[in-house]
Amino acid sequence: MAYGADKLVKFSTDGLGFASFVVAYSISDNVWKKLTPEIQKAMTDAADALIPAACQQVQKSDDEGQEVDGAQGVKFETLTSDSKAQFRT
């Protein structure tokens, strides 16, 4: 449904992603080194806990979008294992 593509698409593949996004939260090495080991660990632990939850939320959003698209008449084609291998190559 991103970019309004849901208004244009009549067919879609299922089981193979063609896009993704990256969110990066950064801190300079100079600032990082000024943090105490406890704060560094807390930040690293928080990131480790957040990443799986963020991935699950993205998957949930994708699944919901597919449901909406299907309800609007988009036809989904599940790719065969051979086709998936060709795309990966």
Image (tube, helix red, strand yellow):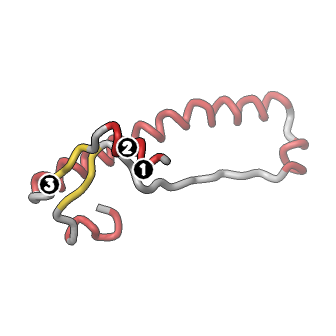
CA gap between label 1 and label 3 equals 20 Å
**Tag 1, which secondary structure?**
helix
**Tag 3, which secondary structure?**
strand
Q: Do the residues labelled 3 and 2 touch (CB within 8 Å)?
A: no
Which of marks 3 and 1 precedes in the sequence? 3
Residue type at tag 1: Phe
Q: Please give the name of the residue rendered at 89% of the width and 42% of the height, measured from the top-left corner.
A: 33
Q: Please give the name of the residue rendered at 34% of the width and 63% of the height, measured from the top-left corner.
A: 2
In the rendered image, residue 42, in percent from the top left (x then y), is placed at 71, 31
Q: Based on the displayed image, in which of its 4 quarters is residue 81 positioned?
A: top left
**Tag 2, which secondary structure?**
helix
CA gap between label 3 and label 2 equals 18 Å
Against 29, is 43 above or below? above
Q: Which of 11 and 87 is in front in this view?
A: 87
In the rendered image, residue 82, in percent from the top left (x then y), is placed at 35, 40
Q: Name the residue under label 3.
A: 75
Q: Do the residues labelled 1 and 2 touch (CB within 8 Å)?
A: yes
Viewer-nearest of labels 1 and 3? 1
Which of marks 2 and 3 precedes in the sequence? 3
Q: Mark 2 points at which residue?
A: 84
In the visual, does 70 lie left or right of 87? left
Residue type at tag 3: Lys
Q: Are marks 1 and 3 in contact (CB under 8 Å)?
A: no
In the rendered image, residue 23, in percent from the top left (x then y), is placed at 57, 53
CA gap between label 1 and label 2 equals 5 Å
Q: Please give the name of the residue rendered at 14% of the width and 54% of the height, measured from the top-left corner.
A: 75
Q: Please give the name of the residue rendered at 41% of the width and 55% of the height, measured from the top-left corner.
A: 18
Residue type at tag 2: Lys
Q: Mark 1 points at which residue?
A: 87
